[in-house]
Amino acid sequence: MSTTVETTPPSAAQSSSQRSLIAALVEQMARQAPFDRMERDHLAFMAERFKLGYYAKGEVLIGPGSAPPDRLFIIKQGVVLGEQDVARTEHDTAFWELGPWESFPLGALLAKRPVASVYRAKEDTFCYELPVGDFRKILHLSEPFHDFCTRRLASLLEQSKHIIQAQYARTTTEQQSMNSPLSAVIRHTPVSCAADTPMVEVLRTRKGHNLGSMIVAGEDRIPIGIFTLHDVLDRVALARLDLTTPIREVMTQGLITLPPRAFAYEAALAMIRHGIRHVLVTDEESGEIVGIISERDLFSLQKVGLRQISAAIRRASDVGSLCQSAHDIRQFAVNMLAQGVGSEQLTEIISTFNDLLTARVIELTVAEMGLDKTPLADRYCWLALGSEGRLEQTLSTDQDNGLIFEIPDGWTADQVRERLLPFALRVNEALDTCGFPLCKGGVMASNPQWCLSLEEWRGTFANWIQRGDGQTLLNASIFFDFRPLFGEACLCDVLRQWLNGYVVQYRMFLRLMVINALGNRPPLGVVRDFVTSAEGNTLDLKLNGTTPFVDAARVMALYAGSGETGTVPRLRAIGRHWELEPAEVEGWAESFLYIQMLRLRSQYEKLQRGEEMGNRIDPDGLNDLDRRILKEAFRQARKLQALMEKSFQF
């Protein structure tokens, strides 16, 4: 039987001992998330109205019924098991585990509906209980509490991010958030000139305003070109051009523009891909110039700039030069991680750099082997697979790639393969030299199994889908994340369209993919917070952390016919296809990205200590907030798996 001890209602006649107890409770709450962000008066409001409930081991605190819950529970001491259904409780299998200072059932309270799960005391447990009327009052009074209740995971993630940034603030200054919109990054009012302005006037204006570049625009303020320091050197000084020459004759055209609402990391990606130093910001409707973003604006503190890396890759003449660029990419990623850049942006930037390096390796190899002078010159495409295909590479990654080709007239597939395999082997070996280890499973373009014509890829995929055995399911988890990296992208696009149309005809294969994915459950424990390995008491953040999200997103995106390959874009595409609540979808995305960030942080720390990078962590080494967020992220993975399981009951 539960026991509830009621506190004296708040009044002016409270004894000094009661006031002391309330003050002590407020101090204790102020050290716990999310209460540490609330005003003291609001904490006192809650503390004065708490009731203290006691629940013996095995006792149900609250369960499904016909009425909405009448109170908020905040665990003071003990552990509460959230159980999915009666069948699970009979087998003593917890769906999740809640510890001190975790609260429930927020969803039911906010929606004014009955709870869907059974909450049972795992051991003797004490809870602070806030009546529903007072819960709604404090929800209205306190913005941080309201934010936590309505955006529970996002709120905790923001707190964790602030802690990380505060840690690095001791060694860095003037941090630039890569999530900032470009409108917030623009530092100066743009200065422009007309296309017929003589160069001498442009040079005087640049010097007078201390400008690194000059925008060339029409009377409508729509940019048509840019004049940079490199233009001065290459097109004016070295050419000894007359300074009365109109600027239109020496400006750089083919501008890269982004709207003000685009994020800083998108400008960074544009600079990497195009090997430029400046991105123009233009109004989405009128096309008028709003500002200009330079590499210096984005990364003023970086020892190695992104343009330097991308330029070094583009002009590299041998593998040795590219090895240095690969090192610079990893150092650049570490610097960005130290600045608090989000995992979604960071992994995409790492993958984009790696794409650029791989493409340069291929270019050099093509020229060296004379492949560009054969009938195969424009008839193949290098495929990125696995994490590279999803643009989700971390600091520690190996190779997963393949080749797709079309067969020239008079050739056979075997003849094409015979010509391409030595080329692919040289590329794979060069990438290995640059620090991207050869795939131990042989998933590389130099393997004849993965150097196939378009028709052969179709046949291979069709065979897997029709068979549906363990090996084919494993292959699907790698190969179905393909995207074009170098060469004729249309071959890849045709294969993607065919696959999306073919796989939905074989619902049993999709069901088998679901069953296979459900075999990897997030490691939430009953005896402890997490299920860890017997050796070293560690978790594998890739296998048990991100993979449940990746697998669920893949199979559901295939069913939805989505062409996305990244996990987060797939989740959002799934949300649109099934018309799911946006907040629920973002909860999955944020959870996946948080685990990705833990992987990156762990790899960075191991790199700093000179240890081998990997994906295993000791959860006992996390701070309380990160442990709590990780538990919530694993719960989100289980919710996504539950939706997947329910959606494929055929």
Image (cartoon, rainbow, N blue to C red):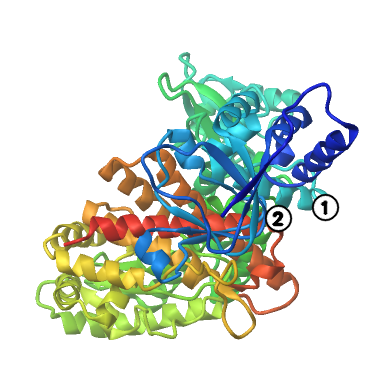
Q: Where in the figure is residue 603, as x and y percent of width and height?
A: 64, 69
Q: Is residue 16 visible?
A: yes
Residue at which label 2 appears: 338
Does the residue at mark 1 contact the one at mark 2 (Cβ under 8 Å)? yes
| Three-letter code for the amino acid on which mark 2 is drawn | Ala
Element marked by disc 1 = loop
Q: Is residue 245 visible?
A: no
| Three-letter code for the amino acid on which mark 1 is drawn | Thr
Position of residue 511 relative to residue 173, above or below, is below
Residue furthest to the right in view is 16
625 displayed left or right of 587: right
Q: Quadrant of the N terminus?
A: bottom right
Q: Quadrant of the C terminus?
A: bottom left
356 displayed left or right of 333: left
Residue at which label 1 appears: 171
Q: Where in the figure is residue 18, as x and y percent of width and height?
A: 83, 36
Q: Which quadrant of the view contains residue 375?
A: bottom left
